Image (cartoon, grey):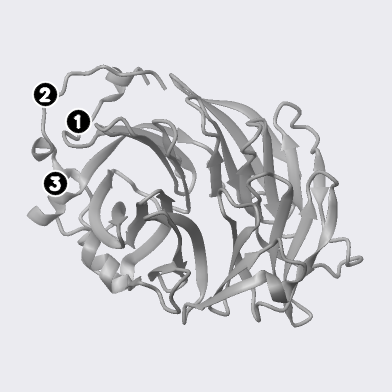
Amino acid sequence: MQNLKIKVESDVENSDSSSGSNCWDNSDTSRMFYELDSVHEELIASNKYILHIDATCDSEPNIATALTDGWCQIYKLINNGMLSIAKLVGHKEKIIGCRFSKQDPNLIYTGSTRFITLWDIRTPEMSVINFIDTTVENDNFKTFNCFDVSPNERLLTAGTELFGGDAFLLFWDIRKRQLLGGYWESHTDDITQVQFHSENKDSLLSGSTDGLINVYDLSQPNEEDALIDSLNTQSSVDHLLWFKENGKDNISCITHTFDLQLWNLEKAAPYEHFTRSDIASLLKEKNEKHTYLAKVHGGINYLLLLAGSNSKEGKCLRSLHFQAGKPQPAYSFKNNRQLVRSSWFNHNVSNSISSNINWYHLEFQNIIHYGFCVCTNMQLSCLYAKRGNCLLYPKEVLGL
């Protein structure tokens, strides 16, 4: 994205908060949310939904959108919008996720319920390799729910539904292109999330509908020794994330009942637990039954929760910023009209993404740049704002 040098002449108090949807309580308290306005929207598909998005950490990133028809469309974000550069067609089943390589922006992993595929977007007509479960034959297959890649890209893991009474974590050696083995004794129900630590190649989280968050040390020789902690959410795990707090590794968990739990590895219970009702109150939502939690994005001493309202009055989106486990109002995403299904947050450059796709650009006065992209149903849009003054840049100024 182009660099902007714009004189700030307005203040956040001058923004028109009444222009948003009426699903929020627009009292004076709601002015604590910095209002962000979309400045670019892109229709990705007219008759399909976007299920997942991911992007590379570049100033002009590649953006992947995984659709309900099993296709994965790749775009490049450039100064005047989004350019379609590749279409990956290889999955007949539901896509469960997409992950760009951290080492090569031209490589991307996509996963379906049957196999995980590595692609080179420069040659999209043919996949590089398919990672499959070679322990089964014919139609007797394990159904994949989720996957992740280790930070050094040596190991690929997938979590499965129950198969023969067991839920499996399967591991592949990416370089040797072969299945190494699996774990199947740590969960008693479908595995819904797997998450490698961003720096430690041997640290892995798994979450399940059995309510457990399991923490593994993959350097150990077997599953029994590798399972170093098991945290009971008393619910069903939907989304997991590693994040740093005061130099220590912590875990955030969104449950299928729309609770947010924050854990460290020193306690047997979450150090913070926010119910759906708590989140609705913090977001100034009129009716907690309409509140949903979309995703959590984190960094060092920083956690951002995306949450919205899905009611007949409108599909709104706001965010909360957590420091030391304490929530503060963050952003209100103006003019959001659809349910957010996925999002991507870039801490390294001034960009971010979500699915409809709406693109929101957050530029902070302390020179730390963040990027954020949220995914609704079929479309993508972009927004620029400056915290403190919350100056809303129109499309014409941005050259979009």
Q: Nearer the viewer, mark 2 or mark 3?
A: 2
Q: Position of residue 378 (x, y in %)?
A: 49, 44
Can you identify the residue that label 3 sits on? 18
Query: Of the residues under marks 2 and 3, which one precedes in the sequence?
Result: 2
Q: Amino acid at mark 2?
A: Glu
Q: Position of residue 195 (x, y in %)?
A: 58, 58
* Element marked by disc 1: loop
Q: Are marks 1 and 2 in contact (CB under 8 Å)?
A: yes
Residue 192 drawn above or below residue 306: below
Spatial separation of the CA atoms under disc 1 and disc 3: 17 Å
* Element marked by disc 2: loop
- For disc 2, the neighbor class at 10 Å (few under 14, some 14 to 19, many from 20) is few
Can you identify the residue that label 2 sits on? 9
Q: Amino acid at mark 1?
A: Leu
| Image quadrant assignment for residue 262 | bottom left
Can you identify the residue that label 1 sits on? 391
Give whichever of 88, 391 is nearer the camera. 391
Name the residue: 8% across, 53% down: 28
